[in-house]
Amino acid sequence: MHSDDCDPSPAPRQAPRTRAPEQTRRDILDAATAEFSEKGLSGGRVDDIAARMSTTKRMIYYYFGGKEQLYAAVLERMYGGMRDAEAALNLNDLPPAEALRRLVETTFDHHAAHPEFVRLVSVENIHEAKIVASSPTIRARNAAVIGSLRDLLERGEREGAFRPGLDALDLHMLISSFCFHRVSNRHTLTAIFGRDLRAPDVMAIQRRMIVETVLRYVDPRPDAI
């Protein structure tokens, strides 16, 4: 076990004043996101995080208390970024089918733009969701998006835009699975099939594909699928 896996000697009573506190927290989280997404929780080192931002372990422990707490804060921010992007859509102001289309597009775009989020979620699954299970923040925010999706499905059913009997969690998994898989497995898929999944034309085709797949799945017409 690395020496920085354990808390160092007690932190000073006052935080160093070289940076504004909120900016310092953001800088630490940025460096920790890069470290943990590259090396995971076990391989990531507080020494290396400090080196990335030219600070000290003592500064990091002052703000976050320890390596595991810092990792939890990184995960909370990563999940929060996805949930913030969804909340910004104001789905209630859009017709059901357009709202769902925008949600799928946003999910695709966010995963594509944030491969570090995908890697961190993969790492957390290796650890059997230890941090996610202990974080009320992550659980609450993810429960909220399922609630919003459930409301959208119910509204779409009432208005005749969606077929009845759709489950919000199942639909969330359908949307997320492709968006996640194409990022998490892009290196092996490229190595095996020779297709660059980051190429703009490939991304555009796959973005349309997952939107069309989801909209056909919820379509109330019997011949839609």
Image (cartoon, rainbow, N blue to C red):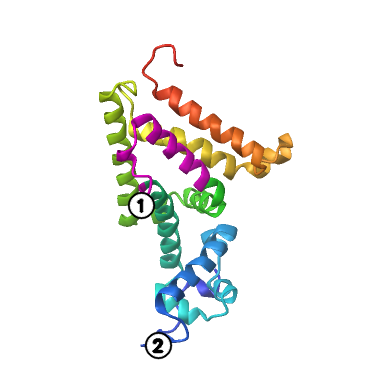
Q: Which residues are magenta?
A: 87-110
SS class, disc 1: helix
Label 1 vs label 2, nearer the camera: 2
**x then y, percent, for residue 165:** 30, 23
Residue appearing at x 27%, y 30% in the figure: 155
How busy is the neighbourhood of tag 1: few (under 14 within 10 Å), some, or many (20 plus)? few
Residue 212 highlighted magenta (yes or no): no
* Residue type at numbered disc 2: Pro
Q: Residue furthest top?
A: 223
Image position of 175 with respect to 52: above or below: above
As shown in the figure, which amino acid type bears the numbered disc 1? Ala
Identify residue for label 1.
Answer: 133
Q: Give how far across and how far down residue 203 sits, in percent.
A: 61, 39
**In which quarter of the view is residue 77 placed?**
bottom left
Residue at 30% over, 51% down: 140
* Quadrant position of the N terminus in the picture: bottom right
| Residue 90 magenta | yes
Label 2 crowding class (10 Å Cα cut-off): few <14, some 14-19, many 20+?
Answer: few
